[in-house]
Image (tube, grey):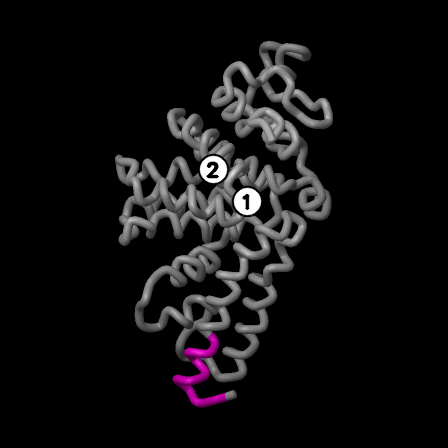
């Protein structure tokens, strides 16, 4: 599959708004008309309709059901690439271990050929000055909550791939999570999955250590439902497999508390 065909057939709502503008600038001469269904990129649509239109104009809000139906695997993929490029530059440098992590994760999810195309786009996107707020607001508007949680989990993985999550990276991801419409509890839960500290099991389940055993059980059922891989099934099998890591962390946290308290 060619680079142009990969882009044209994979994307849905991300052809528009700030993400569409970023893709168009990254691809340069490929922007003419790459959509598999004839939908132009943002740059071409502007030429046809109005050269004075704001490229960061958001589409009208839609229901959550409509958002999930429109989000393609490619929309998630490109959103991930753009946010990853921001995180990698957060500490003022591009660590090769972080770049290798991104490449390897994409190979695991999409296979070698598709991952190579994605990483080529990633390198072009990384050279741009990107409005994190505008990108995140578009993602919040168009992508379902479970998929946004998966984005956040991946970003923490990138930050830790060099062996240490810098404070500036944590602040950057926290700011992103706010723009993405992710609560502080969800942020702390996912963050706790990447630290080996006392009481992290409780943070993963979004509860305090003082709660009763019954409350622990209820919290586990709630979190298992929230992070179940089927919640991102509409994005494809590759994303379900990626979501299994979060699900395992929830199970691990619950089992740790079970052992600590001695209940079943």
The percent coordinates of residue 188 (x first, y second) are 41, 59
Q: Secondary structure at mark 2?
A: helix
- Residue 82 sits inside the magenta stretch: no
Query: Could you say which quadrant of the image residue 83 lies in?
Result: top left
**Vertically, is 204 above or below 147?**
below
**Vertically, is 201 above or below 44?**
below
Which residue is at a point 63% across and 47% down the rendered structure image? Answer: 235
> Would you say the residues marked 1 and 2 are in contact, meaning their CB atoms lie under 8 Å apart?
no
Neighbours of disc 2 within 10 Å: few (<14), some (14-19), many (20+): many
Which residue is at a point 27% across and 40% down the rendered structure image? Answer: 91
In the rendered view, does 236 fall on the left or right side of 247?
right
- Point out the stretch of residues depicted in magenta: 254-263
The percent coordinates of residue 68 (x first, y second) are 68, 46
Which residue is at a point 73% across and 27% down the rendered structure image? Answer: 37
Q: Which residue is mark 2?
A: 81
Question: Which quadrant is the N terminus positioned in?
Answer: top right
Alpha-carbon span between mark 1 and mark 2: 13 Å
* Sequence-first tag of 1 and 2: 2
């Amino acid at each position: 599959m060619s680079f142009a065909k990969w882009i044209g057939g994979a994307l849905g709502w991300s052809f528009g708004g700030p993400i569409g503008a970023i893709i168009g600038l990254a691809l340069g001469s490929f922007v003419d008309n790459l959509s598999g269904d004839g939908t132009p990129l943002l740059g071409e649509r502007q030429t046809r309709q109005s050269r004075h239109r704001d490229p960061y104009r958001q589409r009208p809000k839609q229901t959550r059901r409509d958002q999930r139906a429109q989000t393609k695997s490619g929309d998630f993929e490109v959103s991930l690439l753009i946010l990853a490029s921001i995180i990698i530059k957060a500490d003022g440098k591009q660590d090769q271990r972080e770049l290798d992590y991104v490449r390897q994760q994409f190979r695991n999810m999409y296979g070698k050929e598709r991952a190579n195309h994605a990483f080529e786009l990633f390198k072009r996107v990384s050279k741009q000055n990107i409005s994190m707020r505008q990108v995140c607001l578009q993602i919040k508007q168009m992508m379902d909550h479970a998929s946004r949680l998966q984005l956040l989990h991946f970003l923490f993985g990138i930050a830790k791939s060099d062996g240490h999550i810098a404070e500036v990276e944590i602040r950057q991801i926290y700011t992103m999570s706010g723009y993405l419409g992710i609560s502080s509890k969800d942020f702390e839960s996912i963050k706790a999955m990447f630290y080996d500290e006392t009481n992290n099991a409780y943070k993963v389940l979004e509860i305090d250590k003082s709660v009763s055993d019954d409350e622990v059980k209820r919290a586990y059922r709630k979190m298992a439902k929230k992070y179940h891989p089927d919640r991102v099934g509409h994005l494809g099998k590759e994303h379900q497999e990626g979501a299994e890591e979060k699900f395992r962390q929830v199970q691990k946290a619950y089992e740790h508390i079970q052992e600590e308290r001695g209940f079943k």
